[in-house]
Amino acid sequence: LARYTRSLRRSSRPRLARVLWYRQQFDSALGVYRGMSFVGGFVWEYAVVLNGVGRPADGLALLDSARTEGVPEIGDRVAARALLLAALGRNREALDHIHTAATRPYSRSHFHHAQFTIACAYARLGRKADAVEWLRRTAANGMPNYPLFRSDPNLGDLQGDPEYERFMAELQRQYEANGRLVRAGER
């Protein structure tokens, strides 16, 4: 039982950090990561959270330290690298990494996480149409997270863009309909 409890605690912490990240509570998410003895495959999320607290260079350094020589990075890490490079103004490198991430849709995690990060990178690069297209792909691929898409600071420049606002209106209707279904089941 003790081993199971330790295993459960190890596997739930990165997911707790993700929830905090999605709620834009970057400092709290960072605290969870700092308290973990092993981050493993969630290193890319840790790097994105570092970007969220204004430390994209530290996020990039973290990804570099986790690289394994001769082993290609999974799509999530490449997408995170693209976002961090975009945040640092290294636009050409960011675009190269977006292309690489987009061609690696199969990884240990669900590709919708990489798709969302690609959307964020495109938004940081000022490529609004591309960002909205990747948000649409993210939603269609199992992650229609209206609150995250509306509040993530990387997507801030999309606010007011007509195509983004149309998509957000669609997603909000879906989000509210799903909420009504959940509440109906609670009665």
Image (cartoon, helix red, strand yellow):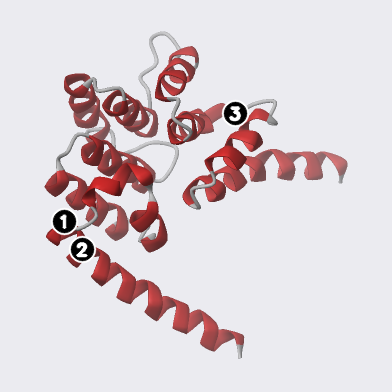
The residue at the point 38 percent across, 10 percent down is 70
Q: Quadrant of residue 4?
A: top right
Residue receiving disc 2: 165
Mark 3 surroundings: few (<14), some (14-19) or many (≥20) residues within 10 A: some
Horizontal and vertical percent position of residue 164: 19, 58
Residue under the image location 57 percent in, 27 percent down = 40
Residue 178, horizontal then vertical, whole percent: 42, 77
Secondary element type, mark 2: helix
Sequence-first disc among 3 and 1:
3
List the residue tagged with mark 3. 39
Q: Secondary structure at mark 1?
A: loop
Residue at the extreme bottom of the image, as rendered? 187
Q: Amino acid at mark 3?
A: Val
Judging from the image, what secondary structure is the residue with disc 3 in?
A: loop
Identify residue type, mark 1: Asp
Image: 154 above or below 140: above
| Residue type (three-letter) at the residue carrying disc 2 | Glu
The label nearer to you, 3 versus 1, is: 1
Rendered image quadrant of residue 75:
top left
Observer-nearest of 117 and 148: 148
Q: CA distance from mark 2 to mark 1?
A: 6 Å
The answer to whether the residues at label 2 and label 1 have Cβ atoms under 8 Å apart is yes
Q: How many marks?
A: 3
Say left or right for 73 vs 38: left
**Residue at image location 64% in from the left, 35% down from the top:** 31
**With 44 as the anchor, is 25 left or right in this view?**
right
Q: Say which residue label 1 marks.
A: 161
Closest to the camera, between mark 2 and mark 3, is 2
Please name the residue shown 16% across and 21% down the image: 92
Q: CA distance from mark 3 to mark 1?
A: 37 Å
